[in-house]
Amino acid sequence: MCITIQLTHYVFSEYKAVMKLRDWRKLRGLTTTEAAQLLGLSQPTISRIERGQSWPNRVTMERIAVVTENAVTANDFVQEQV
C-alpha cells in the first residue's frame, strides 16, 4: 500500500513539472525550438522533458528556474515525500 501511494505521488509530481514547463512555454507563444534555445537545450531534449520521457539534471533544473523566472522551479521536479 505504501509503495502504491508513493508511486502515485511521484507520477503527480512529474506531471506537475512537465505541465508547468509546457504551460510556461505556450503562454509565451514559444515553440519547443525557441524554448530550447532560451534554456540552452536541444529541441529534442525539451520535447522529451515536456512529454515526461526525460528528466532534467540539477543544473538544467536550475537553468529552467532562472529562465522561467521561477514559474517552474527545481522543487516542481522533485518527488515530494508522503
Image (tube, rainbow, N blue to C red):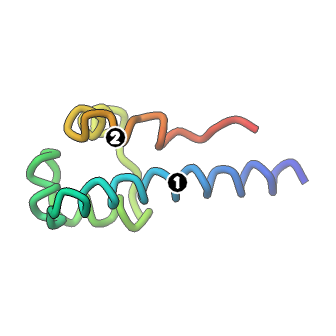
Task: Give amino acid for label 1.
Answer: Glu
**Left or right: residue 10 compared with residue 36:** right
Where in the figure is residue 1, as x and y percent of width and height? Answer: 90, 54
Where in the figure is residue 53, as x and y percent of width and height? Answer: 42, 65
**Which residue is drawn at the image coordinates 28% and 66% (left, top)?**
47
**Which residue is drawn at the image coordinates 81% and 57% (left, top)?**
4
**Left or right: residue 57 compared with residue 52:** left
Where in the figure is residue 58, as x and y percent of width and height? Answer: 36, 33
Q: Which residue is mark 2?
A: 71
Give the spatial CA distance, label 1 vs label 2.
15 Å
Within 10 Å of the Cα at label 2, are there few (<14), some (14-19), or many (20+) other Cα atoms? some
**Which residue is drawn at the image coordinates 52% and 39% (left, top)?**
78
Mark positioned earlier in the residue sequence (1 or 2): 1
Q: Which residue is mark 1?
A: 14
Task: Give amino acid for label 2.
Answer: Ala
Within 10 Å of the Cα at label 1, are there few (<14), some (14-19), or many (20+) other Cα atoms? some
Which one is nearer the viewer's eye here, 49 or 75? 75
